[in-house]
Structures are given as structure tokens and as C-alpha cells.
Image (cartoon, rainbow, N blue to C red):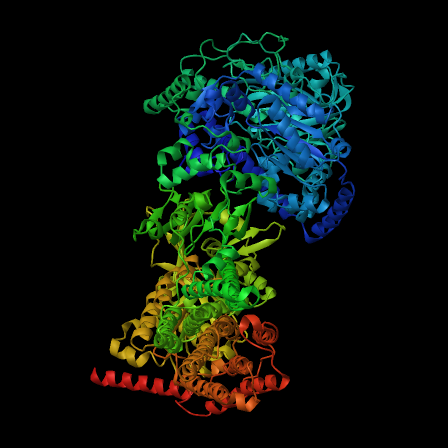
Amino acid sequence: MASSAGTPSDGGGDRPWQSYHTAYTNAKAGMEGVDKEKVQRVIYEMSKGSKYFENEQKKEAITKQKIEHLRAQCAKLTDNDISHFQKVAEKKIIELEASRDLSKIWLHTDMDAFYAAVETLENPSLKGKPLAVGSMSMIATASYEARKFGVRAAMPGFIGCKLCPDLVFVSPNFERYTHYSELARKVFQRFDPNFFATSLDEAYLDITEVCIERGITGEEVASELRGAVHEETGLTCSAGVAPNRMIAKVCSDINKPNGQFILPNDRDAVTTFVSTLPIRKIGGIGKVTEQMLHQVLGISTCQEMLQKAAFLCALFSEGSTDFFLSVGLGLGGTETPEHRLRKSMSCERTFSATNDSSLLFEKLDNLAENLADDMQKECLKGRTLTLKLKTAAFEVRTRAATAQNYISSKEDILIYAKKLLKAELPLSLRLMGLRMSHFHGEKDDSTSPTQKTLDRFFHLSENNSNTNGTNGASSVDASRDNNYCNDATTNDECSINDAGKDISIDQQAIFSLNEKLSVPDGTSSINHDNEPASSNMKVTTTERFDESASCKASASSSKPDEHFWRDGYICSLCGFELPPCFEEERQEHSDFHLAELLQKEDAVDSTLHLSKERLAERPCSTTPTPSKKKLKSSKEGKHIPIDSFFLKCNKKEKLQVAVSASKSTAQLENGLSLQGQYVVPEDVKAAGFQISADELTSIVESRDTERLTVHGRLHGIADKLATSLTDGISMHEDLLNQRQEIYGVNKFAESEVRSFWEFVWEALQDTTLIILAACAFVSLAVGVATEGWLNGSHDGIGIIASILLVVSVTATSNYQQSLQFRDLDKEKRKILVQVTRNGFRQKILIDDLLAGDVVHLSVGDQVPADGLFISGFSVLVDESSLTGESEPVDVNEDKPFLVSGTKVLDGSGQMLVTAVGMRTQWGKLMAALTEGGNDETPLQVKLGGVANIIGKVGLFFAVLTFIVLSQELIGQKYYDGLLLSWSGDDVLDILNHFAVAVTIVVVAVPEGLPLAVTLSLAYAMEKMMNDKALVRQLAACETMGSATVICSDKTGTLTSNRMTVVKAFICGNAMEVNDPVATSSLSSELPQVAVETLLESIFNNTSGDVVINQDGKQDIIGTPTEAALLEFAQSLGGNYKQKRKESKIVKVDPFSSAKKRMSVILELPGGQYHAHCKGASEIVLAACDKFMDDSGSIVPLDRNTANKFNDIIETFSSEALRTLSLAYRVLEDGSTHEEIPLKGYTFIGLVGIKDPVRPGVRESVASCRSAGIAVKMVTGDNINTAKAIARECGILTDDGLAIEGAEFREKSPKELLELIPKMQVLARSSPLDKHTLVKHLRTTFNEVVAVTGDGTNDAPALREADIGLAMGIAGTEVAKESADVIILDDNFSTIVTVAKWGRSVYINIQKFVQFQLTVNIVALLVNFSSACFTGDAPLTAVQLLWVNMIMDTLGALALATEPPNDNLMEKAPVGRAGKFITNVMWRNILGQSLYQFTVLWYLQSQGRFVFGLEGSEADTVLNTIIFNTFVFCQVFNEISSREMEEISVLKGLSENSIFMGVLTGTVIFQFILVQFLGDFANTTPLTQVQWLICVLFGFLGMPIAAAIKLISVEPSQKTMGMESRRLRQNLCDLCIEVS
């Protein structure tokens, strides 16, 4: 039996079972996630020391010899040979491609776990239980529930019990299987009357006509057929649809069980699909052939077949090469195969080992007679005779001869058979067989070529497992698995057979260890060259004996030691039923009985003389015929039970097997299986799953290991979720939709979007507006009652209309703001997670995650859903967000539960998603929390307090205004004695006075302040998103504007994070490797051992991966540093996948900022262990005491050499290269390997990685410096590299300091006071160093600090800082969760943009506050003074409401959305102690208020004279002029407020569309209000002159504002900033002196 590694002869080594492969360890559908090592170990322990074990060793040795022989042949090929064969190959590929037929649509269907499914259907109590059809001697079929434990067909039942203690056995019932097979075939016939079946449960259908006639797709046919089969039989099946049979068979295996896979009839789709297929997926390529192709030619996939086409042409026959290249191109049979006639007959004899030549020739005579009789009975003649021999050492040899004429007589057969046998003697043999093939004039068979009856299926010889051959050819390989052929023969044959063809791939093309004979001329010719044989060669060693087509050798069923298959499928010795399609399993079964007899023979050899002859027909023969000659029987008596063949004489072990068997039987009889407690819901079952979402959720939530075990633990859950632990879920859209329907999507239930009318209702809840509304309705009622509807409704309707206008504008603004924040929340959920789907590793959004997905987790990741741990190393999870417990939790195979929302603190691994979205624990927690409103930012809180104070002042003035306005009327009433007598006009007057007072409160209360903050923040957040910055906390926007220090990472922030290895120092030699040519030449210059060690280190000690994407191209996944190393290793000629297979990773210590290195322990094939370490150069070098010299030898590392290496590190670093060192250590025998060593390594080499500075960083740093923001670099890199990069960025100046973290940690508080202001670079820093620096800057120096971070360990510093900036690309989820702002492009220039926007937010809010306070002061003064001096208010309630809207909502919208300008970064930051309302603002507010009040008071007192107003309408016209002038004063003051210090306020005005829109809308509506809505607004139309004067008064406010700005009230912000820093420095000096 072939295996990838030899089976130790003594069973030695720590894990000898890892290289022990038998048919039992071959994965079948449903076994993808099985722990293969566990299965190997069980089989190894239960078979070690048996004859079977020895047999496996022999076969392994022979396979190795074949591989070495082919390797030797390959080595003989010259460049000229390869060039020649390359041309031959190209020609063949063109010819084969021309034969591609895409006109047919083939469907292959395969019933799922057929026998087990039938038994479950007949006995529903077996549903959900691990079921085996068979007995304790042998299992015929295992259910999917059993396969997840490693139980499979052809496995002895007692081994199955060992693997699955709960295994339930059912005896086979072939009548029942036949019945269900016939039902299924009736369904097949509806779609293709000429379908052909390859076994009871498999068939090929040509559905081309169905698709054309009905106008449907192959996918629809597959779905319809599967549904019809289920409806007809109650069973499920899998289907594959493709342009040919070969690929259709592969497709049907992809989504098992109960699934389908459709490959369109498109050349590109076919070639892309086939390119990544492992060659073992193709029928006709077995294990031996696979290993020879892989180990000698490096061929693992079908695409590599084409890449190595020249070698295939050189080493293999024409027929074999055509087959291999057809596989690479994805070509296969497209025509319905014609009825294939019998192609061979054979018979064999097994006997005690003997080297007696006379006895051997006697047996040969008997075989020839039997073969001749059988051939003559069926009127057959053949030309090719094959002799098969099995030596005493279980080595199988085959020789073949081709006759010149067709023969059938015993005499003719013996002529060739004797010559073949003579060529092998002398030799000790225990088995001999003859096979005749290449028939002529075969007997015709009238049976339908495609509708084989079940009887014919059992009794006729058919190579029915290979109907998917190339272009109609049937491909056979004796070494392949998948239950078709048997490696036990150890023949290296791989035949392509069809009617009229008989081509042996491995025997014609590969060669054999046996010599080749030429028989027809009667001479013996030995081919010493072992050159590949041509397809027309006369004599070859042949393909394996075709057991499915063997002649019925003479046998007597009465002889207990003779083995044959009674009725075609019942073992004559043990009664076990196994149909002919199980060729490999039948071969194994035959070997079991052979080993039994040999074991018995050894046991009684000392006392009894066994018969020399035993007859045992090969396992796939059918009903025996009477023997032609009586043969001696073996020793009478019972045969040894099959378990004794495996088990050693250990009573304890036998007792365990008996107990397991009893337990299984008891479960079957009493129905006590725990799985019976769970019933799969019908909708889940109908969707193809075997477990519900609620059950999965319950298991993980309760961490119920017992229920998990009941379901088969990890592998069982994976099976029930219809997923693969290695390849993940299928990406077929229909299957994804089914999975979503059953298990949900990974989204949390969002609160319902509040409608616009809800915001309208919320705006109407304002107390002052309610009072105004009440006044309006009373006014309306009284006015209509006294003056009629036409004249009495104006005031009331005007107030109501104004209220509605204010409400609508406010509601619209709030509604738009809510939508904006909702969109930003969605942006926060755009987290990418790495998953494996369809066998491809890829990144998807966290919201797209589904149950069954295989997720890859690493340090810093947030667990995206609930799930189960698959595999990994040192996974440590923080569950404090859920449990409140701060202690991290270990996650491993014993404690596999992972819950959503937790964080990975250490290690890496994979998880199987079991619950998503609201079914996760985190989702339920979110649902339980009541939705809270958005938290107010500090500035909103501060401005809210200011608004309250102003509101109270306004209320005071409003009450005074009402008293002053009403006192005259009330006083007159009192004087006239009519205090209790009130007319309608009196009531209206009082109501108007009250409305004016209330409106003054409305105007005075600056509710627009918090709105302005929110609008400005929301606008800034949206714009920052466009600039690659995602704001997670609103407060960060405003705080960033006050930042005085930025502590930035280097890698990926200041640099581009596009890393490449440009220099290397290996084996004591430094060299440039910045181009592919230099790198490729490097591998030839270095010692081979150094290259191999270097590749072993890079490819295994990495968190990256090299994968094939869906386009068939190679992708490197991982951090830029890992990608650079992997790319460097590949350029040295390394193969990532191959190198990873050569060893096993035992333990991993992932990289962290604290350790600054990553380490692994590897287990090598020979049982040796290596530890590999990489990381910070000086740290790794310090752990080494040896190094590899230029000859590849290991020599001690002395101090001088270490100093030389350190100089190299410094040289690399000074060139701005990031340096990494690699080292390894051979671990001593007996080591526990539990802890990775810290010392004693051998230095392999050093690489210098170039990471160029990002464009624009230097300018951004200069911009920060001019803005008064200090930039400090905090990096884990080497200090020389850090200094070089810092200088290039402009961070490190001549008077600046750069120190290492180790030195920084040693400084006293006194020294830090002096050091921190001067320090510009902190290298080799730990996360604690960064936290300490930030804390000192904030507390001791009172700085506002912004910090960047990307790792999990940066979280404390990010939380400590005023503004935490996480990297969006390199940052971990833990870092992002701790940050206030996420820099999506990891660019330092984006950080500067965030600072600019932060300042813009702060300044914009200051502008708005200045504007609003000016309006408040003027409105209060005008109405109050007018009320006091004239007894009337010039501004009515409606007018004041309009002014309120101008200054609140529209003013906030205009000023709060001003974009930042370049001047912002030329001013010093506000800092922590800066005042919000500055002296400059008070100057502007008071100056503008004084001007406006003067103008309005002048108009109030002198307006009649100035405008010449007379008559009854004079007061109305004057009040309208005052109102109009007041509004235009606010319009122009709004423009002046764009700059608080600069005189030029028009710059960029035309580019601000929002501002221009607000101004235009205000002017237009003001014109409409004055000219056309006088009845409602208490205005009257004005003349052109009056309009001009109003506008002129408003415009004059702009030059007045400019003049006011010339008044100096405080030092410039730049000067202030400098004075502040000077004062801070003096404080530091004073502290130092005091200390």
C-alpha cells in the first residue's frame, strides 16, 4: 500500500503511525475533517506485529523502489531531450485541444451513503446514529454520522468500534439495495433513456437533449432529478454537471451529501476548474501513480500536468501521455460508451511458500488448463498472457507476453507461461496467477449497453468504475483508490481500456522493476536501459489482474480454506457481503483471509504439516465453477477469526473490543443512543442539513460538551452543517441562500429607522413652540369672532405658519442627520474576516459570514460569530466584554467554544462558525440592551450650559418686555374702572404682547448651538470618510482640533507598507537581492544546507500563507513583512506547500510587540525536532551561540563574530532598512517540546527589508510643525532604521533626541521631565513604553495627545490618549475597538487631514456661536428698548420666528459646514486649557451688536422723518423697514462671521454651495415675506428705495466688522502658542531645580 512515508519496520519513533497508511485511512466523502492521525494510530496499534503489517511494509518498500527508478530515468534526460519533448508536448496539446467537445451536458449522480441510507429509511430509529452496514468482521458502508469518526467501508468492524464506541451495526440486505437502486434508475431513465450505471448507486446521464427540448439549464435538471429521486426513494443523492463524464464525476463529489455542483459548458470555466484539481480527484490515477508523479516530477494538480508535459512525453508511452494531458486540459468522454465486451479472464492459486520448481510448474500447468477451459467455454481467444507471482516476502511481480496469433488452448498458453516463469526462477512463491487479455471474436451480449440489469452488475465482468475516461476511454490504475482498484497488488499499472484498446499506462510507460521479455521468437531478451516503452511494443509487464473480469478458476465451495465470492458478492469464508464495485476493499478482504491462513500456518508449523496447496480465487470473481482437477485441501478445522489477524494476544485489548461490540449491540437493540434525543426539524433536513440553528446556539451558549459529543463533536457538527473543515462551505448561490434561510445572517437587528414624521412630532414637543401655538389658536379664535375670518385670522395663521416652517426645517435637518449617522454606523461594521470557501482562502465582510464558514483568527482579531475551535496554537481569548471576567480564557480542542464579540489576545487558529447574528451571545446581549441616544460630546455639553444661561437671560427680558408692553393697557383699565371688562381687541392686544414675549424667549434660547455642533461633526465625519478616516467617537472630531502632540508608528503609517527584501546577510556574506536575477543566483552561491534551512525557517515560521485564489493565481496572504519574506523565499526556488508538508508544526509562539519575535517547533519526518525563531535582529542574534559559515557548517559564535554581525545590522539599519534575523535550533532527544527555547540557537541569516516613506509625509510633518503640533515617532524597529526614516520624514531634527525603549524605561521621573520635550524618536519600544510616554505627555505636560496604534498591545495607549488613531489596514480589531478614529489607508497624511478637520469643526462652531450671540443681543435690546420707550415692539412674533430660523437652523447649516482652509494649520492649537469663547469673539460680537442696535434704534426713532412716512400705515411701513434691515444685517453678518480674525471673508465663498444656498434662500424668502405675505407677517410691501436702504444698512455691517477686527484684544495664536510652550519649558526647568 502506497504511502507518503515509509512505515517503520520496527514501529519505532515517537509517532510511527503518522506514516502508516492503509485503505482505511483514505478519506471518503464525509471524512474531510477526520483526525487522520488518530485513525492511523488506532489501526497501527491494532495491527502491529501481524502478517498484514508485514505485508504493508513490503508493499511500501516496493513503491519506494519504483519512485527511485523513475527518478533515475528522469535524471538521465538532457536539455536537448527536454527541448525536443517540449515541442512534441505542445503539438499533442494542440491536437487534444482541437478534440474538445463542449456540445454535450453530462450529469453524474451518486446516492449518498447508499446502503446506510436505505437501512435508515427502513428503520427510522437508526436516524442520526453512527451506522455501519456489515459486521464485526467487515464494514460494507458507513453512514455520514459514522464517517466523522473515521469509520469507512472495508474496515473491520471491531476497528470501527474502537474509533466510534457508539457504532451501530446492521447486516447487509442486497435485495433491499437492489429494490431501491431500481427505483432510482427509473428516475434516471426519464432524463436519459440510454443512461448507464456504474454501480448500484452511481450513474451517468447525457442530459443534452433534455436541456434543449425543455429549454432549461443543467442546474435545473440536476435539482429536478435529485428531487425526483428523493420523492421516488426517500433517499438523497449528489449530482455533478459538466461537459464530459470525467469532470461530471469530480463535480458530483464537491457538495456531498445531498448537493450539486454545476460547471458550465465554457472552455475557460473548465480549464480554470481543472487547473487546481488534485490529480487524485481524477479517475484513473491511483496512489502509486500519484506519488510517482508528485515525488519525481512535482505534479500535484492537473494544471501541473501541462506544465510538465515535456517530461510526461519523455518518460511515458504515447497513450499514457495522451491520458495525462487530457486530464490537464479537462477533456473526458462525451459520447455514450458502447457496450464493452469482456477484456480479460484470470485465475489464481494461493499456497504455502515454496521454491520447488517442479511443484511450481505443476501448479502452472493446472492454471493453464483451467484458463484454457474457461476461454474455450466462452469461445474466446487472446493474445496477451500475463503471469502474476507473489513471493514469500509478499512482493508482487508481473510479466507479460504478446503472442503473434490469437490462442486459447492449454498447450499454447503453456508455451508462453513457462517462459515467463523461467525468467523469474529461482524464487520462493506463495501465489501464482494467469491472465489472458486482448481478445478477438468475443462473445456478443444482447444486453442493453446502458441499462445493465442488476444480475449483470453482479455477474458480468465490467471495468465499470472508469466510465469517465478520456474521450470515451476507460482509465484504470491498479494503484488508485476510491474503491476501484487495489494497491495491494503493488503493480505500477494504470491502464486505459476500451473496446479495441488495451493500453497500460504504468506498465508500458513507466517501466517495472521486473525485466521485459520478448517471447514470440522464442528467445529471452532483457531491456537493460529501462527506457520508456512505446505503445506498440510486443511484450510488456502487464496491468493488474482484472478481478472484476476474472475467469472462474476452479474451486470447491466445500473447502473451508478456499476463498471466493459466492453469488458474486458473498465471501465464501465468512459470509461477508461486498459487491464487485468495491475492488480495493475486496482485495483487502482477500488479504485478511490470506493472513489468517498464514498465521494459522505459523502457529501449527512445529507440530502439523499443512497441505502444500491452497486454492483461493481472487476476490472479484463470481460464482465458482467445478474444478477441472481435484486439488488437495488444506488442514480441516475452524479458521482464525479476522480480529485475531489484527490483534496481538493481549487480553485487555480483546476485552475492550468485546465491550465495544456489546455496547453497540445494546444500543441497537434498546435504542439507547443519545442521538435519538435530538430530532432534526423537517425544514432543516429538507435544506440538506442535519442540525438546527437553535440546537447549535444552545450547545455553544451553554458550553455543553456532552451534547457536543453526542453530535460527534467538531467533525460531526461540520458534517451536519454540510461543510468541510478544510475547504469550507460551497459558494454556490443557491446553497448560500439555503444556509442563510436556515441559520440566518451575521447582522444584528437594527432599530427601526425613525420616519420623518417622528422627527416632526419631536420638534413639535418644544415647550415654547407649544405656548406659541396656543397663543396662535386663541388669537385666531378671538380675531375671527371679533373681526371675521378675513381680517381676524391673519395673526393666528401667520404664527402657525411660522411654527410649521420652523418645525419642518428642524425635522428635516434632524432626519438627514440621523440617516448620516446610520450610514456611518454601517461603515463601522465593514470589518473584513478571513475565511476558507470552496477551498480558497479569501476575505469577506463580517456581515456576509454564515454558519459553516471556516474562519481564520489571529492575534488582535475580534471573534466574528459563535463557533467551535478547529485547530491552532496558543489561542487566548478575552471574554470580559461578555462575562465581565478579566482573566483570559484558553481555547483548545478540549474547550472549543468561541463566542462573538470576544477578542483574541494571543495565538492563531481556525474556527467553525455555528451561530451568526442575533443567535450569537453577543447578538442577544445587544438585543437585551435598550437603545440609548447618541452621547453628547464635551463641546455639546459645554454649549448646552451656555445656552441655558442665555435662555435664562432671555426669559428675564421677555418677562420685562411683557410687563412693559401690558402695563399701559392694564393701567388704563384700572384707571377707568374697567379692569373686569375686556373687549376682543383688549384680549388680542394682551395676546400679542404675550406672543412677543414668548418669541423673545424663542429667539434668546440658542437651541441652535447643540445643533450646530452635531451638524458640524456629522459633516466633518462624512468628509473625513472621503479622506480615508472613519470617526468612531464624535468627540474625537473636536478634540483632534486641539491636539498638540502626535505619537505616530513608523511601519505603514510613515512608510508605504510595501515591503521587499533588498539585502541579505547569509552564511557570513552580505549581498544585494533587490532584483529576481540576483535572488535566483543567490541560491546557487549559497550552500545547499543553508538554503534548505533558510526555506524551512521562512515557510514554517510565518503567520502568512501562500494560496491559490479563485482565478487560479498565487496569492500571498499576511502582513507586508511576512509577504516580503515569503516572496524572497519563493524567489530562491522554494515551494511553500511542499516545504510545509515536509514537517509538522508542533507549537507556535506568535509575534507580539512585547517579545518582538516569533517562534515555532517543527517535527521532521525522521522524528527530529527543530525550533525556529525570527524577529528583531539584535534580539535574535543575542539568543544565538552558533552560526552557519560560508560552507554551511555550524560553528561557534564568538564575541568578535557577534560584533561583526551587529555592525552588519547597524549598516542595514542606517540605510533605512528594516532588519529581521532568522535562527534555528536542533532540539535534543527527550525534550518535552512544551516550551520554545529562548537561547542556544544557530544564526541562519539576516535580511534587510525596504519600506519606502509614503509620498507627502515630509510635507505633512512640516505642516504639523507649523501648526504647533509636535510629531514623535514611536516604533518597535531598530534605532538606526528609525532614525534614518525619521530624518527622511522630517521628524528628527538636529536638536532632537532618539532613544531606545530600554533606555527610556530606565529614566527617572526627573530625567523624563527633561527628556520628553526633546525626544522625537522612541525605538525598540514596547506597548508599555508607548503608554508611559502618552501618560506623561497628558498629565505632566498637559498636552492633548493623539496616538496611532495597530496591535492588540497598543490598546492601553490608545485608551490613554485623548485621540486614539487605529490603523485600518494593519490594525487589529482590538486596536480598532479601542480607537476613536480609524485611519483607513494607514497614512500619516490622513492623520494631518483629521487634525485639520478637527480644527475646522472647532472653528466653525466658534463662528456660529459668534453669529448667534450677536443676533440674540440685538433682538433682545431692540424689542426691550422699544417696549420701554415706545410701548410697542417693532418685531412681531412671526418676524422673530423667521429671524430665529435664520440664526439657528440655517445659520448652523451655513457656518457649521465650512470646509477647512490652509490657514488652519498655520495657527497654534487651542490646547487643553483654551477658552471656547475667546476675547476675539467677544470683540466681534459686541462691536457688531452695537452697530446693529444703533442702526435699528435710529430707524425706530428717526425712521418716519428719514423716509417721510405719514398716515395710518406709517407705523406698519416703519416696522417693516426695521424688520427688513435687521434681517439683512444678519445676512451680511453671516458672511463676516466666516473669518473671526481675517479681513478677507469672501475667499472661497463661491465654492461653498451650502453657504451660498442658505444666503440665497434667506434673501428670496425675505422678499416674499415682505412683498406678498404682509397679512401674515405684519409687513407691507416696500419701495425700491426703501429696499436699497435696508440692504445698504446691512451691507455696512461688513466694513464695520472688518474695522472691528483691526482692534487688537489678545496676542496672535502663534505668539500665544510660543508663549505657552516657553512657559511650559520654564515650569519644567523649575521642577528640575526643585528636584
Q: Is residue 543 left or right of residue 901?
A: right
For the point 70% across and 18% down, which residue is it?
Answer: 413
Q: Looking at this view, is 1010 or 1254 the one in front?
A: 1010
Q: Provide residue 726's location: percent of width, then percent of height.
A: 51, 42
Query: Would you identify the image quadrant in which residue 382 lies?
Result: top right
Q: Residue furthest left?
A: 1634
Tell which residue pokes out farthest to the front in this image: 977
Q: Is residue 916 visible?
A: yes
Residue 626: x %, y % from top left? 62, 8
Question: Horizontal and vertical percent for residue 1252?
Answer: 52, 72
> Residue at the location (60% across, 81% down)?
1582
Q: Quadrant of residue 1608?
A: bottom left
Q: Residue at x 50, y 22 (%)?
A: 120
In-front residue for pair 501/892: 892
Q: Is residue 1253 visible?
A: no
Q: Quadrant of the C terminus?
A: bottom left
